[in-house]
Image (spheres, grey):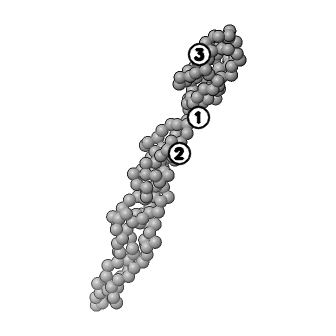
Amino acid sequence: PAMGGSISGSGINCPMYCTEFYESCTDVTLNATANSGYSFNSWSGCNSSSGSTCYITMDGDKNVTANFCQLNTYHRAADGDGYGNPNDPIRACTQPTGYVINNTDCDDNDNKVYPSATEICDGKNNDCNDDTPDGSGEPWHGNPTSCGVGVCSSIGQLMCLSGNQVDTCAPGSPTEIP
């Protein structure tokens, strides 16, 4: 238990003093205390236990172990996209259902918004990167367009504005030549 915590009781102060001799029929109570970053998990070798307290009646040699587990930080992934909410952590020994290790989701209410998601034209920051233009992951985004005829012809490109595909091409006006 030295790494995860300590055990104390009558004559016991483990990890320093982990062995003690008792008269037969002696009732012994041991208490487990977890170190920082650990949690008490269970006892083995007790006659009975309640939480972090172990009760033993000496009727022979006993080997009692307090089991500790290392705490990890998990983050709620409410939308099921595999990326966790940095503002909703929990410390636990094992990963709870609905929680993940990473904490990089920028919108845990939308499973189409997470780091490295394809940036589609929907008015949302799908990839959690403010520098990526909305819709830049669409196959048409940035494609050149043309419009108008003859001297009124012009060029533009397909863009995403406010979640809508927009053609920036506007027919030109003929230029007067003096």
- Residue closer to the observer: 98 or 165: 98
> Image point 40% across, 63% down: which residue?
134
In the rendered structure, which amino acid carries the disc numbered 3?
Thr
Where is residue 168 drawn, in percent x and y?
35, 74
170 w.r.t. 126: above or below: below
Q: Position of residue 128 (x, y in %)?
A: 44, 55
Of discs 3 and 1, which sits in the foreground? 3
Q: Which mark is residue 29?
A: 3
In the image, residue 65 sits, relative to residue 155, either above or below, namely above
The three-letter code of the residue at mark 1 reads Gln
Residue shown at 67%/14% (left/top)? 59
Residue ID for mark 1: 70
- The residue indicated by pointer 2 is 101
Query: Is residue 175 in view from this perspective?
Result: no
Please identify the quarter of the rendering in which residue 151 is found.
Answer: bottom left
Question: What amino acid is labelled 2 in the image?
Answer: Ile
Q: CA distance from mark 3 to mark 2?
A: 37 Å
Q: Who's the residue at 33% across and 64% down the image?
A: 162
Report the number of discs: 3
Dividing the picture into quarters, in which one does residue 39 lie?
A: top right
* 3 or 1: tag closer to the N-terminus: 3
Residue located farthest toward the top when viewing the structure as drawn = 23
At x 36%, y 62%, the residue is 123
Taking depth in this image into account, of 129 and 14 the one nearest to the observer is 14
Badge 2 crowding class, 10 Å Cα cut-off, few under 14, some 14 to 19, many 20 or more, is some
Task: State whether residue 60 is above or below residue 158.
Answer: above
* Kind of element beneath mark 1: strand
